[in-house]
Each structure stands twice: as C-alpha cells, then as structure tokens.
Amino acid sequence: MKPFSRRDLVVRGGAVLGASSVMGAVGYVSAKELAQASEPTAAPQPVDEPADDASTWEGVRRQFAIEPGKVQLTSFLLASHPAAVRRAIEGHRDGLDAHPRDYLQEHELRLEEAVLSAAAEYLGTAPEQVALTDSTTMGLGLLYGGLQLGERQEIVTTEHDFYATHEALRFRAERSGADVRRIRLYSDPEAASEDEIVEAIVDALRASTRYLALTWVHSSTGVKLPIRSIAEAVADANDGREVRDRVLVCVDGVHGFGVEDVAVAELGCDFFSSGCHKWLYGPRGTGILWGREDAWHAALPIIPSFDGRSYRAWMEGRPPEDTPPGAAMTPGGFHSFEHRWALADAFAFHERIGRPRVAERTRALARQLKEGLAALRHVRVKTPMAEALSAGLVCVEVEGMDPGEVVGRLDERGIVASVTPYATQYVRFGPSILNTPAEIEEVVAAISELRR
C-alpha cells in the first residue's frame, strides 16, 4: 500500500483517515483546513557561505560564534552551532513564526526525510532503521524501557556507565521486575586493555543474559570500549542460542559519535543511541536511536508515533503493522522543528569537513594534551594513551587539588573545562575541531603552574 502524503487525505464523516508517511505532526488536519490554506510558504533557500571554508581548521573555527579569548574544551557537554546550522534554524523558525500551519504542512515531510537520509548515510544504514530523538538520554529511555525480556532473562551493564543508563535500567527493573546486573570492566582506566575489557564481558555472560548495556566512550574516564571486538565475542557466545535468547549489544555512543571515523552500522552492536548536539555540532535538542534490522523486533515503542502509517492504522482500527521500526520508535507530538530539521545541515557540515579529518584532528589534539599533562609530575592522566582505547575526552587528577578547584582556577585564565559528574571525580577536557595546538599548549602551561 502506498504511504499517504500530507495531501493524500481521505475524508470519512469529517474525519481524516490519512497522514504523512513520515512523522506527521499535523497528519490529522481536516480537509477543510487544507482547502482554506493560503499559498504554500516557501522553504528557506540555501544561503551562500562566503566565509565558510572547511578546507582549513581556521576556516572551520570561523564558522562558530564562540567568545574570543576563551579556550573551549567542553563541546562534549553542549556544543556551539556552526554558521550553517544557525542559518537553517533561523530560516525554519522564520517560516514557522510567519505561518505555523502552512509551513509545517508544506515542508515537514520533505525536511524529515532529508534528516533521516542524512543520518542514515552517516550511520551507514537505511532511513527506516533510524528513530529521531531529543537526546542520548531519551533514546536510552525509549530503548531500555521497551526491550522485550523473557522469563528469567537479564540485562547486564557496567559500573562505568553514566546516570542515564543506570537510571533507565533501574526504572525498567522497578516497573517489570527485570534483573539488572552491573560488572566491572577494568580496575585502573589508564592501564585498561582491550583483552581485559573483552574478557570481563565474556566472563559475565550467562545463559540468562539477553542484553548488554554499554557505553562507547566513558565520560567518567575517557576510556573507549572496543565495541567491535566486544560484538565479535558476543557473536561467538550467541552461537547455538535461539534467536529469542541471543545477547544483543546496546550502546550509548554519544562521545564517539562525531569523533570516530567509523559508520555505526559497522561497529557490530545491535542498538545505538546518541545525541547530536555534542561532538557532531548539531542543533541542540536532537538525537538518534539506531537499531540493526534484525534486532528491532526486540524493542517495543514507548511513546506513540505520529508516523502516517501508524495514525492511519489507528483510524482504521488495526495494528500499525506497516510502520518501519525507526518511525515507530520516534516519539510523536510536536517538537522543536526548526532544530530537528536543521540536523541535516549539521551532518552536511561534518561531511564537508570530512570524517577522517575530524577524527585525526581530534586524536592529534587529545594526544598532545595527554602527553603534555603526563610529563607534569603533579598530574596523573586517567585516560589511556592508546588511541584504540580513547577518543576525544581526557580526564586527569592534579595532585593535592580538588577537581572543582582546578576547573575554577582554569576558568580564571579563560580555559573552559569540567568536572566528571561521578562519585569519583576528575578534571575533564574535550579537545575538538574548535581547538588549536597552541591552545593545547596553553592548557598544559596553565596546569603546570597550578599548585596549592
């Protein structure tokens, strides 16, 4: 059956029996309203970017409206918007402010499809396998709340995971009685090894284990898990298991997404959640949830989708059997559309720079920072030196100083860092495409002078 577009409406007794084939926020608008709509509003036209030179790092930096004189090392918290994303947001906002209904009706379908296509290309998958969310946390909540568990099956996570994973799993356990078990992957982050991590996971698997809830790059230490090696080990453990008993690997990937030069679909995991407003420099309040085609059967939606196929099925009194999994998992309702639709421009910006270049630049700056700080006698770098086990985050201890005090002292010098929000706290930096080697030297020099 051909999906309904926004204007392919069938009216029965004044009700509308159709909606857009994507996440239609106004799929239920009446035919009378459509007939009375004013002339179609124009979508924002592409704007020339005379200063947008992505061929040089200085050209890239000029696209951000960051405050001069500040060394910004916290894009992993909330990133600045590049010029192309700012313009896209402003264009969509102007259209929605001028005529909300018409702009939404005329452009939502095309713009949502553009975002899904851009996300899918970046992930190395099909648009049907991608759900749009507002953040990593929303994606994890949707995923862990909707995973199907058989009797006596369990979810295994780690002690190193973030609050969002632990709480989403705790909520799930409280609601359903699901068993959730935590394991430790390494003793000392700076000395962690791939073999140690993979072996800890393999040893933790039981016949009852159904899901592994992991984080690609730990925001507590900067340790990057070897997800592909873990997935291969899990695949070996799944050999001989029934489909309903196989272990599925679920990943919070936000601190690798936009940093690593790898398509998510090639990592080997089964589910992947990430916000897009950190290392990708996407619009604030945007994210994705991806699932492997043969894994989506394990996840049930939590929030009703506004996909046209789901809406039409409801109107016809039947289950939405033809809604693709990504669309079914995308929460319905009305969103910050100007931000969501500008996400396609963020992916385009990232690809314009080049994913390999972004990865190499981030690695080089992180390596420079780790080596510079490791040479200081009063500093202990907690993040592994090996690039196979680290990404852009760099976590350190400064002898005799509280992490909060260190961050405060650096603030006084215009260096923006953060404290890891965990029981064990470190000073945390995130060198990125916004930074320069000279800025990294400035950070090392500043910390070399820090003493009680």
Image (cartoon, grey):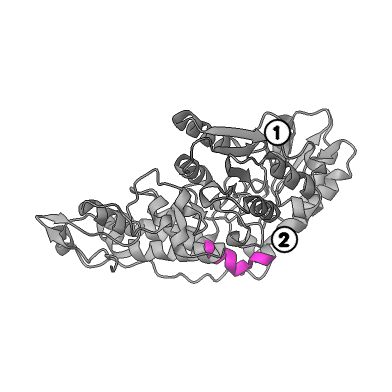
Q: Is residue 156 magenta?
A: no
Q: What predominant SS class does the magenta segment belong to?
A: helix
Q: Few, some or many C-alpha atoms within 10 Å of disc 2 (few <14, some 14-19, many ≥20)?
A: many
Quadrant for the C terminus in the image: top right
In whole angstroms, how far apart are the C-alphas of marks 1 and 2?
A: 27 Å
Disc 2 secondary structure class: helix
Relative placement, left or right, of 163 versus 190 is left
Estimate the x, y position of residue 363 in percent, counting from the top left. 74, 57
Query: Which residue has dot 2 on it?
Result: 361
Task: From the viewer's side, name the closer residue of 163 and 290.
Answer: 290
- In the image, what residue occupies the spot 43% across and 66% down? 114
Amino acid type, residue under disc 2 in the picture: Arg
Query: Which residue has dot 1 on it?
Result: 408
Q: Is residue 393 above or below residue 38?
A: above
Residue 88's quadrant in the figure?
A: bottom left
Estimate the x, y position of residue 74 in percent, counting from the top left. 64, 45
- In the image, what residue occupies the spot 51% across and 43% down? 140
- In the image, what residue occupies the spot 69% across and 66% down? 357
Task: From the viewer's side, name the closer residue of 150 and 178.
Answer: 150
The magenta segment is 347-356
Residue 424 visible, this angle = yes
Estimate the x, y position of residue 26 in percent, counting from the top left. 27, 55
Amino acid type, residue under disc 1 in the picture: Gly
- In the image, what residue occupies the spot 53% across and 63% down? 347
